[in-house]
Amino acid sequence: MRCLVTGAAGFIGSHLCERLLQEGYEVIGLDAFIPYYDPDIKERNIAALLPQPRFRFHRLDLRQDNLAEIVRSVNYIFHLAAMPGLVQAWLDFDGYWTCNVLGTHRLLEAVRRDADHLRRFLYISTSSVYGRYASGDESLPLKPVSPYGVTKLAAEHLCRAYAEAYGLPLVVLRYFSVYGPRQRPDMAYHRFIRALLFDQPIIIYGDGMQVRGNTYISDCVEATIRAMDAKVGETYNIGGGEAVTVLDIIRKLESISGCKARIRQEPPRPGDQRYTFADTSKLRSHFDWQPQVKLDDGLWQQWHWQEQELARNSQRRAKSQECSAQSE
Ligand SMILES: NC(=O)c1ccc[n+]([C@@H]2O[C@H](COP(=O)([O-])OP(=O)(O)OC[C@H]3O[C@@H](n4cnc5c(N)ncnc54)[C@H](O)[C@@H]3O)[C@@H](O)[C@H]2O)c1
């Protein structure tokens, strides 16, 4: 069985590829290394995948490259490629519109022309499609409050249109705040940990009482794998089981680091969500899925990974300084 993962060099995509290989699938990864965060990080995300015999990687941009060849004889498509994140979306609508909507449209067109082998097309959506209060089950009203949420919802609707018109075997998964090793550098917990490691102030937007239901990366990937058997047309929320405020998270990170955080409060950002907590009853009842990783353990894993990355980066810097000194 062959799987295509778009956004394979990203945070979640790289973990998903690893797990699919462990499960015995042949995996095709696609990514364009879009530089809204350092592409070197993405290179590192997939470094361990590249030598694996059942993994092939294609550096392709969904917005402009020919996709016909890559979708041929694929059995499962996991469509994760997108521009995520909140702040940038107000500044670069063109990037969000083209990567999230146009890119999805070009992929759907390629699939429509050659879908003989396709069993499932899993579109990876987000709690942001629900808007400011994303707390409940999949029937919550869809009221995105950021260009990111709007473009992700537009792509979700586009997938549904292809399902209706051309029988695309669609399943929609809405992820809620995923965290753990390789979390994107723009995401809150990554920023908080980095600030503590560098003894810098932690910037929070608003009063810090906004609530998040976090999903540890391995729980997110497990739910995604189980959803490969979902009934065509289903939509699932994927989220962890513990709701906490941003200030709770900072207290937990203080106890992991043994350092007192210096908090700098800034005004809330336009489009910020106030309360996100997934009702995952449907996912639990259909697939007997349960989040396995407790928030305290997951945060510790992410802390440990960022600490190691910091050490590896300073080794890399020292080595490159040594090389340039030798060549002078
Ligand atoms: N991280 C979360 O908490 C979270 C929550 C909800 C939903 N999601 C969704 O999960 C998916 C993955 O998120 P992530 O956090 O791993 O982000 P990420 O930025 O780490 O990964 C996305 C990858 O997609 C690639 N990409 C973007 N546009 C592309 C294009 N036009 N062609 C080819 N590749 C392209 C990027 O280069 C990147 O490597 C996204 O669709 C996002 O909307 C993530």
Image (cartoon, helix red, strand yellow):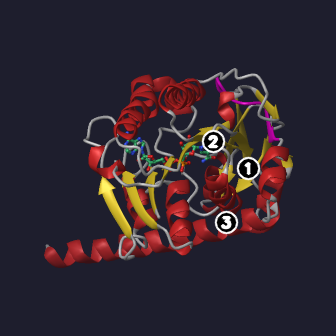
Magenta stretch, residue numbers: 269-278
Q: Amino acid at mark 2?
A: Val
Nearest to N terminus: mark 3 or mark 1: 1
Image marks 3 and 1: residues in contact by CB distance under 8 Å:
no
Residue 295: say if magenta: no
Point out the residue furthest to the left here: 328
**Crowding at label 2, few (<14), some or many (≥20) Cα neighbours within 10 Å?**
some
Q: CA distance from mark 3 to mark 1?
A: 17 Å
Q: Which residue is mark 3?
A: 303
Q: Amino acid at mark 1?
A: Arg
| Image point (39%, 38%), residue name | 107
Considering the whole magenta stretch, tell me its main secondary structure.
loop
Discs 1/2, front: 2
Q: Which mark is residue 262?
A: 1
Q: Is mark 1 within 8 Å of ligand 1?
A: no
Q: CA distance from mark 1 to mark 2?
A: 48 Å
Q: Going by the image, does 4 lie left or right of 225? A: left
Please tell me which residue lies in front, 275 or 170.
170
Q: CA distance from mark 3 to mark 2?
A: 38 Å
The spot of residue 3 in percent (x, y) is 46, 58
The spot of residue 16 in percent (x, y) is 55, 61
Nearest to N terminus: mark 1 or mark 2: 2
Position of 106 relative to 196 (above/below): above
Position of 165 relative to 309 (above/below): above
